[in-house]
Image (cartoon, grey):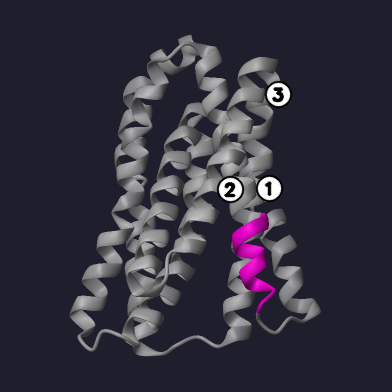
Amino acid sequence: MEQSLLVNAPAWLTANAVIPFIPVVAVLIGALIALWRRPGEGLSSAIQHFAAGVVFAAAAAEILPQVKHEGAIIPTAIGGMLGVATMLAIKKLEESWKGPAGMLSAIGIDLFVDGVVLGLAFLAGEKAGFLLAFALTLEVLFLGLTLTTELSEVVSSRIKVLAVTVGLALLLPLGSFLATPVGHLPPDWIIGFLAFGLMALLYLVTEELLVEAHEKPDTPLISAMFFVGFLGLLLIEEAL
């Protein structure tokens, strides 16, 4: 695994330098849509279900097989436990923050962690990085919609709302860049970091996207969007 990373280093570094900015564009698009017309709760829930399915498929199809293939039990256990502990600690921290500043801080941390996980995904392969970038783009598109809507209630200037939203979105590529040096570590360390990223993605699906989606009106069609997203990404993965 270490050899493949070194051989593909130029392409990997190039992709990891460009792809993380695609979700930033998605946040901007979501913000502009929200400023023009706020989406209904049904559409929001459907987007969240779909995004959850896509993220789950990316984790299951690309990162999980890489972790299992190496058979590194101790690095996997340590990385996985640290991933769970980190996400639970972030959740506890977010619950203690109140008001707009607390909301912005929580979203900023989430975006930064998403960026780190995206950077780690490129360690599992270029295809894994591309697929997870697609999945996170859908997630942050909805985040742009939600954040802009909530900020508009306390900030009157649309320019300021857009500036704050895009500024927070830039934390995602920052997190991705900070994950780049991991590619030069020994294979066991890389597997540990991949296990960390896998746990973070599963937390994103089960404790954030689906939890928030189920707080809105639900129908069988909306719930089915999770499986549409999951199957859709699997088909894309097979096609590639």
Mark 2 residue element: helix
Q: Which mark is residue 2?
A: none
Q: Point out the frontmost of discs 3 and 1.
A: 3
Mark 3 residue element: helix
Taking the image as shown, residue 62 lies to the left or right of residue 97, namely right
* Residue range of the region highlighted in magenta in the rendering: 206-215
Question: Which quadrant of the rendered structure holds the C terminus?
Answer: top right
Query: Looking at the picture, how far across and down is residue 67, in whole percent?
Result: 64, 25
Q: Point out the frontmost of discs 1 and 2.
A: 2
> Which residue is labeled 2 in the image?
88
Query: Looking at the picture, how far across and down is residue 172, in whole percent?
Result: 36, 50
Note whether 125 is above or below 96 in the view shown.
above
Residue shown at the point (40%, 81%) measured from the top left:
150
In this view, the residue in front, 171 or 230, is: 171
Query: Looking at the picture, how far across and down is residue 50, in whole percent?
Result: 63, 65
Q: Which mark is residue 68?
A: 3
Q: Are marks 3 and 2 in contact (CB under 8 Å)?
A: no
Residue type at mark 3: give it: Lys
Residue type at mark 1: give it: Leu
Residue 236 visible in rendering? no
Among the two numbered marks 1 and 2 on one chain, the one whose residue lies closer to the N terminus: 2
Mark 1 residue element: helix
Q: Which mark is residue 234?
A: 1
Q: Point out the frontmost of discs 3 and 2.
A: 2
Note whether 119 is above or below 222 in the view shown.
above
Query: Looking at the picture, how far across and down is residue 23, in whole percent?
Result: 39, 56
Residue 125 visible in rendering? yes
